[in-house]
Amino acid sequence: MSNQKKKKEEEQSKISKIFEAFIGDVALNTISINSDNEEGVWQYYDSLGGSTNEALLCLHGVPGSCDVFFQQLLALSSRGYRVISVQYPPFWSYRTFCQSFKEFLSSLELEKIHLFGLGFGGFLIMKYLEKEKDQRIKSVILCNSFISTLFFTRLNTCGGMITWAPEFWLKRKLLKTFPQKEVLLPIAEALDFMVEVVEILKYDDLASRLTMISTETIIGKIDFDPQFVTIIDPADKGYVPRKVREKVVTKFPDCRYAQVKVGGDFPQLSNPQEVNMHLIIHLRNTGWDPDQETRLNQKIPQKTKSKKKKKQKNHKEEGKKVNEMEKEKEKEKEKEKEKEKENENENEKEKEKEKEINKEEKKNLKKEEKK
């Protein structure tokens, strides 16, 4: 191996190494959908293919792609959950997104859908719930999300002319939202990975996302049961202030609130174990537990069968012993009865003897009287 390759491998973070192995095993799928006379290409990874009609579907934020949820696909699919990580196409209105997203969900032929949204992805999910009453949506998980884009209007510093700005300027603008100070190693590795993701994004993706998030929009009334909503909130600082994130709870007052100790803006990458744990807890609370289903459907192993056979043999032997004991008791009872009969017979014989003796004595008395 050359020195250059060794240096590259040393420079690679753990996240990048795991991702390289991931893309070698999981295929990237694409679906073209026409909505409002606009053709959009949806890209996605599907961990278990069409093996089940229930799935967890993940939506990324402004700096993101379907690559950013690969740790969730790996971890949850190993437990039997079907996970789909989605990259939405460029769109210039929320109406277009909702129509295209609905058609995309229909193309997957899913009956039960659980949505996980990160940042702007969570905002898009709430917009969809506001506009559509989709009975297929069974539950929602939101992380680093918000109900208003007012905070992000400062990103539009070129007088609403984002679409006129060059690609390098858009990327630089987006990367400035990342932490500029020193951070913990897991967060630093997650940021390095996200920088690579941003560098790959195309101009239309960057321009449309920055335009939509920097245009003031709020989430309206949502008719969705808050008991099937979980909010995952990192305890440390991120680009979206805590006060902005906390307002999401006002839309789902009785939701489940789960806090992760460390996470930053991309906790699904920097702290996947804790995030995955909360995802699994959420899905189990909705009644989706593939582990339990597989356990119930599993055949009894040979060892357990042999144990059962041994137990059955032991029960049979114990039963035989009980029967023998009962037989012995019956025999003893019969012997006792026989003894009782013998005693009765002896008593009768003695009585007869006494009678005979009495008769003889009476005879003797009579003889003496005659004399």
Image (cartoon, rainbow, N blue to C red):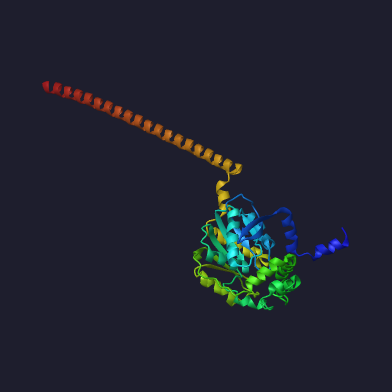
- Residue sitting at x 86%, y 63%: 4
Q: Nearer the viewer, residue 56 or 298?
A: 56
- Residue 67 lies left or right of residue 137; in this view the side is right
Which residue ends up furthest to the left in the rendered image?
370
**Could you tell me residue 13's position as x and y percent?**
76, 65
Quarter of the figure that contains the C terminus: top left
**Could you tell me residue 75's position as x and y percent?**
65, 58
Q: Can residue 278 be seen in this view?
A: no
Q: In this view, does 150 lie above or below 49?
A: below
- Residue 78 lies left or right of residue 356; in this view the side is right
Query: Quadrant location of residue 289?
Result: bottom right
**Could you tell me residue 344's position as x and y percent?**
29, 29
Q: In this view, does 351 lie above or below 172?
A: above
- Residue 167 lies left or right of residue 331; in this view the side is right
Query: Quadrant location of residue 87?
Result: bottom right
Q: Which of 205 and 267 is in front in this view?
A: 205
- Residue sitting at x 88%, y 60%: 2
Q: Is residue 150 above or below residue 208?
A: below
Q: Is residue 9 visible?
A: yes
- Residue sitting at x 70%, y 70%: 187
Query: Quadrant location of residue 73?
Result: bottom right
Q: Is residue 106 above or below residue 8?
A: above
Q: How many badges with numbers are in the image?
A: 0
**Could you tell me residue 283's position as x and y percent?**
56, 59
